[in-house]
Amino acid sequence: MRRAALAQVALAALGGLAGAVAFGAGAGVAVAYGALAAAALSAILLWRERQSAAHPEWDQHRLLRLFIRASLERLITLVGLLALGLGILKLAPLPVLVGFVLAQLGWLAATALGRRG
């Protein structure tokens, strides 16, 4: 999971640089912002995963509540970060979404490679 979060941060830098070179600084910032938003969601997931691993005595009901809470935290964080980026910072929507999807694909690839290797 940690490898996947680090992959997302690396993709934010690379995607932001590629977006800036190809489409201008504004697009680069938007791509990096989208990727960092995805990385923030992964950080929340990683935090909650480590919290549950530190407490092996927790029963299934408590872990289910933690899972639901983490899901809601991630949803609220995503909505807030997208509102900030698109509404207040006035970033272009398409590059933000491209960065977000790129980082999510990076998470998926890093997770798949981590399980295989």
Image (tube, helix red, strand yellow):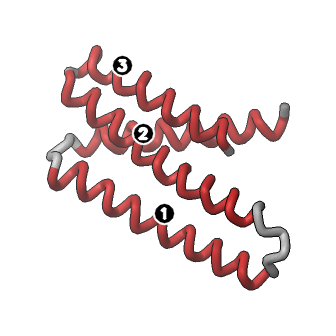
Residue 97 x/y as whole percent: 36, 44
Residue type of the residue flagged with mark 1: Arg
Question: Dot 1: what SS?
Answer: helix
Q: Secondary structure at mark 2?
A: helix
Label pair 2/3, CB-CB below 8 angstroms: no
**Residue 14 screen position, x and y as percent:** 43, 22
Name the kind of residue labelled 3 in the image. Answer: Ala
- How packed is label 1: few (under 14 Cα within 10 Å), some, or many (20 or more)? some
Which residue is identified by label 1? 74
What's the amino acid at mark 2? Ala
Count of numbered badges drawn on the protein: 3
Nearer to us of marks 1 and 3 is 1
Q: Which mark is residue 35?
A: 2
Residue 108 x %, y %: 63, 42
Nearer the N terminus, badge 2 or badge 1?
A: 2
Residue occupying image coordinates x 48% and y 29%: 11
User: Which residue is pictured at 36% across the width and 19% down the height?
Assistant: 18
Label 2 and label 1: CA atoms lie apart by 15 Å
Question: Residue lying furthest bottom in this view?
Answer: 61
**Image x and y of residue 42, in percent:** 55, 50
Which of the 4 image quarters holds residue 15? top left
Q: Are marks 2 and 1 in contact (CB under 8 Å)?
A: no
Badge 1 vs badge 3, beta-carbon distance below 8 Å: no
What mark, if any, has residue 18 been given in the picture?
A: 3
Image quadrant of residue 87? bottom left
